[in-house]
Image: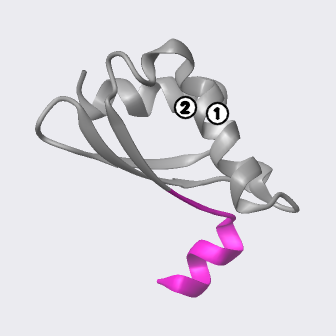
């Protein structure tokens, strides 16, 4: 597994998202996902939305994924 494939999987499920995925060991990754669809959802719900895009890859091809989620407004404020 590589970061680009993870990015593509998340993009397929959250097409309006901005996604940054890093990781160089093939099993441990970090993802920042900025998406308008997160508006009004708590962090657990946002993370669940990301995990849904990855399906059965989590726990098999992806051993660990650290996720940070933001609405566009949150992302703009934290920069």
Q: List x then y, in percent, for residue 32.
A: 46, 56
Task: State the mark number for residue 39.
Answer: none
Residue nearest the observer in this picture, 66 or 3: 66
Residue nearest the observer in this picture, 11 or 60: 60
Q: How far is disc 2 from disc 1 in space, using C-alphas?
A: 5 Å
Specify start and end residues of the magenta stretch as a single range.
Answer: 68-79
Residue at x 12%, y 41% (from the top left corner)? 24
- Residue under pointer 2: 11
Q: Is residue 51 in view?
A: yes
Q: Is residue 19 above or below residue 78?
A: above
Q: List x then y, in percent, for residue 29.
A: 29, 43
State left or right for residue 68 relative to residue 47.
Answer: left
Q: Residues within 10 Å of mark 1 (few under 14, many from 20)?
A: few
Mark 2, secondary structure of its residue: helix
Q: Is residue 16 in view?
A: no
Q: Is residue 43 above or below residue 14?
A: below
Q: Are marks 2 and 1 in contact (CB under 8 Å)?
A: yes
Q: List x then y, in percent, for residue 46.
A: 70, 50
Q: Is residue 68 above or below residue 25?
A: below
- Residue under pointer 1: 15
């Amino acid at each position: 597994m590589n970061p680009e494939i993870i990015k593509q999987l998340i993009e397929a499920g959250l097409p309006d998202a901005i996604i940054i995925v890093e990781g160089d060991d093939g099993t441990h990754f970090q993802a920042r996902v900025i998406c308008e669809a997160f508006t009004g959802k708590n962090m657990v719900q946002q993370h669940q939305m990301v995990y849904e895009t990855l399906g059965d890859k989590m726990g098999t091809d992806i051993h660990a994924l650290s996720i940070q989620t933001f609405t566009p407004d949150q992302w703009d404020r934290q920069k």
